[in-house]
Image (tube, rainbow, N blue to C red):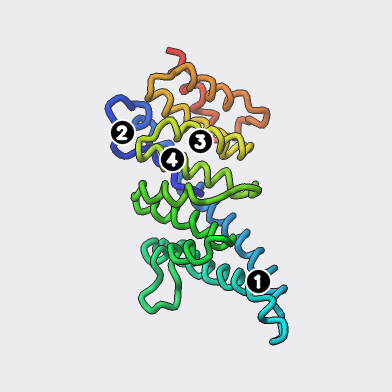
């Protein structure tokens, strides 16, 4: 899933963020892997459906041209996604030197009205996040439209929330991370996003608001002793009540 590291150069008024950076880093790769897996699955399903629907003869070609364009966009997206999976982020964004693989930026532009173009925005945002280019990450993650997508949208919002934190748009970061937690509604992602939002609130001196989020984690119905947050949530609650 999305890269979830606290801002590298937080102001002096943000001790909570830097203090708990190790926790955020611990789950970074898991979250990034999760969102990538979801994107690839969804893209694969869309591509397969388009492939089956595109068994056309010459008489049908003109009528089905828009459908074929969608298929082409998904094919090119999958090629760029392969580079993303190999951590070739610069190449994934701009394409390879031979021109055989189109970059995510061009796909997002040329297929802007299709699902391929939409997903290319999300991939591009994640690429920039990996490259620590946070302004660009925000730009493309904001372009991604997750309406109606219950699988990817929580992780995409989580990625955007963390990107906002990196560019010091802390109020946006809190609201976006909270929204991501609500949409995710599961024991792995929801607590993480609530805790991240709470840490930012603490850094702003809003301990009461942070405490509310920490108590949500503590009180989740599905909260169990096997959760990775069980050993730390009491510490967060205690700190926010001081």
**Which SS class for mark 1?**
helix
The residue that mark 4 highlights is 162
Of callouts 2 and 1, the N-terminal one: 2
Determine the secondary structure under disc 2: loop
Q: Which residue has dot 3 on it?
A: 177
Pointer 4 with pointer 2, Cβ within 8 A: no
In this rendering, position of residue 211 left or right of residue 41: left
Element carrying mark 4: helix
Question: CA–CA distance between discs 2 and 1?
Answer: 47 Å
- Residue identifier under label 2: 10
Give the image location of residue 239, x and y in percent. Answer: 43, 18
| Res. 231 in view | yes
Mark closer to the chain start, 1 or 3: 1
State the residue at coordinates (46%, 14%).
241
- Between marks 1 and 4 in the image, the one whose residue lies nearer the viewer: 1
Q: Earlier in the sequence, mark 4 or mark 3?
A: 4
The CA span between labels 1 and 4 is 36 Å
Sequence-wise, the earlier of marks 1 and 4 is 1
Residue at 37% x, 27% y: name it.
16
Q: Which mark is residue 67?
A: 1
Determine whether label 4 and label 3 are within 8 Å by CB. yes
Q: CA distance from mark 4 to mark 2?
A: 13 Å
């Amino acid at each position: 899933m999305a890269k979830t590291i606290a801002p590298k150069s937080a102001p002096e008024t943000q001790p909570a963020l830097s203090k708990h950076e190790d926790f955020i880093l611990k789950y970074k790769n898991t979250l990034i892997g999760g969102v990538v897996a979801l994107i690839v699955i969804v893209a694969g399903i869309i591509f397969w459906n388009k492939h089956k629907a595109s068994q056309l003869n010459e008489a049908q070609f003109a009528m089905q041209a828009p459908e074929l364009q969608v298929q082409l966009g998904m094919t090119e997206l999958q090629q760029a996604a392969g580079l993303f999976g190999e951590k070739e982020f610069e190449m994934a964004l701009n394409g390879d030197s031979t021109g055989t693989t189109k970059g995510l930026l061009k796909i997002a532009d040329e297929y802007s009205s299709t699902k391929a173009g939409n997903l290319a925005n999300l991939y591009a945002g994640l690429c920039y996040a990996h490259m620590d280019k946070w302004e660009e990450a925000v730009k493309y993650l904001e372009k991604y439209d997750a309406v109606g997508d219950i699988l990817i949208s929580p992780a995409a919002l989580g990625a955007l929330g963390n990107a906002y934190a990196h560019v010091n748009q802390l109020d946006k970061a809190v609201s976006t991370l909270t929204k991501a937690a609500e949409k995710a509604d599961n024991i792995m992602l929801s607590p993480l996003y609530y805790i991240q939002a709470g840490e930012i609130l603490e850094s702003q001196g809003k301990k009461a608001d942070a405490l509310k989020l920490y108590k949500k984690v503590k009180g989740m119905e599905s909260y169990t002793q096997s959760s990775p947050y069980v050993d730390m949530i009491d510490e967060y609650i205690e700190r926010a009540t001081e």
